[in-house]
Image (spheres, helix red, strand yellow):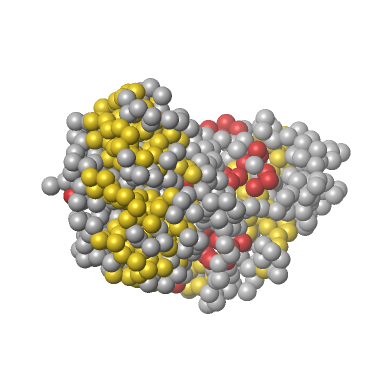
Amino acid sequence: MKRMQRLAVLGVLALVAAGCNVNWAQFRADATHSGAQSESAISTANVASLGAKWSTALTGGIKSSPAVVGGVVYLSTLDGKVDALDATTGAVKWTTVTGSATQYSSPAVANSVVYVGTDTGKVDALDATTGAIKWAYTTGGAVESSPTVVSGVVYVGSEDHKVYALDATSGVVKWSLTTGNNVDSSPAVVGGVVYVGSNDGKVWALDASTGTVKWTATTAGAIFSSPAVASGVVYVGSADHKVWALDATTGATKWTATTGAGISSSPAVANGVVFIGSDDTKVYALDAVTGATKWTAATGGTVQSSPAVANGIVYVGSADQKLYGLDATTGATKWSSTTTGVVFSSPSVANGVVFVGSNDGKARAFTAWTFTRPTCPSNPHSGMSPCQIQDAYRLPSQVAGTGRTVAIVDAYDNPNAEADLAVYRTQYGLPACTTANGCFKKLNQTGVAGSYPTGDPGWGIEISLDLDAVSAACPLCHITLVEANSSSTLDLDVAEDTAAAQSPTAISNSWGAGEFAGEHTLDGHFTHAGIPITVSTGDSGFGTAWPAASPNVTAVGGTQLVQDSSTRGWSETVWSGAGSGCSSQEAKPAWQLDSGCANRTIADVSALAGSPGLALYDTYGTSGWLDYGGTSLAAPLVGAVYALAYPDYSSATTYTHAASLFDITSGSTGSCGGSYLCTGVTGFDGPTGLGTPCGTAAFGSGPYISTCPAPGAGAAAGAEPKSTAILTPACPTAAPGHVRCFAYKIANG
């Protein structure tokens, strides 16, 4: 009747080994069953970026927990097998049949031997390299307990009511002790004492050398949970709904804490806190000294998995088919991953990877995202492919963007927008983004899906460029296209407000006009709390434009991007057509510190604008595949980067993260007397601002962080040389435009 509850306590966590490699070698981390280990690769700062390293389907469900030693993961499966998997790839190295249909015990690894219990009543010792059985000892009942190996002795319980101490080399019995019921709990061994629970409701303390009973402590329910020992206290859960803290020397009760249901989970103890799951669907954090509840975290199912604690994160599975990463201080969910089976397996953490099994028969490994240069397939079209964009800017496009939306504001209608987008995404293997699947939304300027404005082929190309650029950088993002009735400022401002009303992650604008008196009175249309808004700086070279000049937006300049043999694989210079300079109308925002412009300086950041541009598909303004560039391309690329990030956004955010950008130090947008306002220099400059994306760290609060080259040893944003005068913009005042000013057409397109 209690078999399902027993399963959850069986796991292998970490043994912290000396040297570079950290092994998670036997149940609950070490012989004390602490359930914790040192870990630095994954932290609260980047745990949200955990993604699948691999997933391997085995032949049976998995309710045991992984042991990880020497680059190999060892697991038991419910079809009576032990599997050894490569920890890097998930490939199966060997499989050994040890039991039959109920293999629950988790492996323990010591001295190149794997020890595991079987449902046929045996404790098996397997060669860790080959899986060959070295010896087997038969008990009088199924062995669901997970072995603990200390100083050449294997300690394990059996459903014949006994606890055994076996010689690790030969399997010979050193001693056994009979309890009052099945022993499915795994023994903890500390200071020459074995602590173990029994289904007779007692915790037993036994002399590790002789098996002599030192004390017993009685609870009001069966004990499937395995004890953890820390600072002279034994912690354990019971089916009586309580967590017990017992004096390790006498067995006297120090405190109890009550949960809402029975407890099969085993406790982890770290930094003075006891972490444990309950069948009431919650995870509990209890003060180790007093038992006071520090926090609880609710899941969607019973928590029979045992927590693993590493570097401020509590990892634990649930019957809701999820693995959770909880903040150890607050209990807040920092990360979760959904499987297709209940997760009674207890996770293991080793060398920056979280390992776990699931009842769906899959072993999984998760690791924090780090950028690895992709091998991009040959591009059948001129212009850059999505893979090349992601490579050039070190983007987490394959793992980030889900649930985020980039809104695009353009004028007039492109009636082929959705159909052309489908062709583009199919060509490059990107997931479908359609109205039917909820990814794509097209609205008129009042927010209606219908009654669209008159079509315009020129703006139609701009729309296709924007849609394809967002798709290239953030293929998992949703896209909302808002079409203004015309290219008048009045209509575009209405469309801007409509886009913001959709609560997107970011808004991109690839349009603008020369600056004009009173433009600041319209800046409110670009002020929407928490929504970063990108705007192209223009394609007429040195000179400023609005709304890029608004201090409420991220003004996006342009670069020339060339593939090379450097470590990055790409080099960038200023694109000569990018708008840049000193605003004649807008005041300098507090977060912009350059001293050569008394007003707002343009740009803030930049991205690809010059040749080779982006390969795009459009059948309304043209006849198919083209390559386009200009800052009309740069703005939606940066808008998509905001969506890939976690936009803890304010206008000053990027200015405090300049080191997380590629610094562009050469090229010019025109004649300005050599000033940084039109020339690429070390640090901040007009054409490229602070630089181009290097991952997403400069665009939000995490967690996709890429290591970027250190900026040049040049001055900070406030120390560029002053120009002799405030320069006036070169772009003439006109109605907002797109191709004429912003969508630069590459000559060979």
Tell me which corner region of the image, top left, top right, bottom left or bottom right, holds residue 52.
Answer: bottom left
Depth check, front residue: 202 or 340:
202
Residue most extreme to the left: 1
Image point 45% across, 57% down: which residue? 110
Depth check, front residue: 302 or 159:
159
Q: What is the quadrant of the C terminus in the image?
A: bottom right
Depth check, front residue: 15 or 665:
15
Image point 29% across, 61% down: which residue? 137
Percent from the top left, x then y, of residue 503?
Answer: 41, 40
Q: Is residue 305 above or below residue 398?
A: above
Percent from the top left, x then y, of residue 625?
Answer: 51, 73
Q: Can the viewer see residue 745 in this picture?
A: yes
Q: Is residue 25 above or below residue 565?
A: above
Image point 45% across, 35% down: which residue? 270
Q: Is residue 655 left or right of residue 45?
A: right
Q: Is residue 205 left or right of residue 420?
A: left
Q: Is residue 364 left or right of residue 218?
A: right
Tell me which corner region of the image, top left, top right, bottom left or bottom right, holds residue 140.
Answer: bottom left
Percent from the top left, x then y, of residue 177?
Answer: 26, 45
Q: How many marks?
A: 0
Percent from the top left, x then y, of residue 109?
Answer: 43, 58
Depth check, front residue: 366 or 60:
60
Q: Can the viewer see residue 14 in this picture?
A: no
Image point 43% across, 34% down: which residue? 230
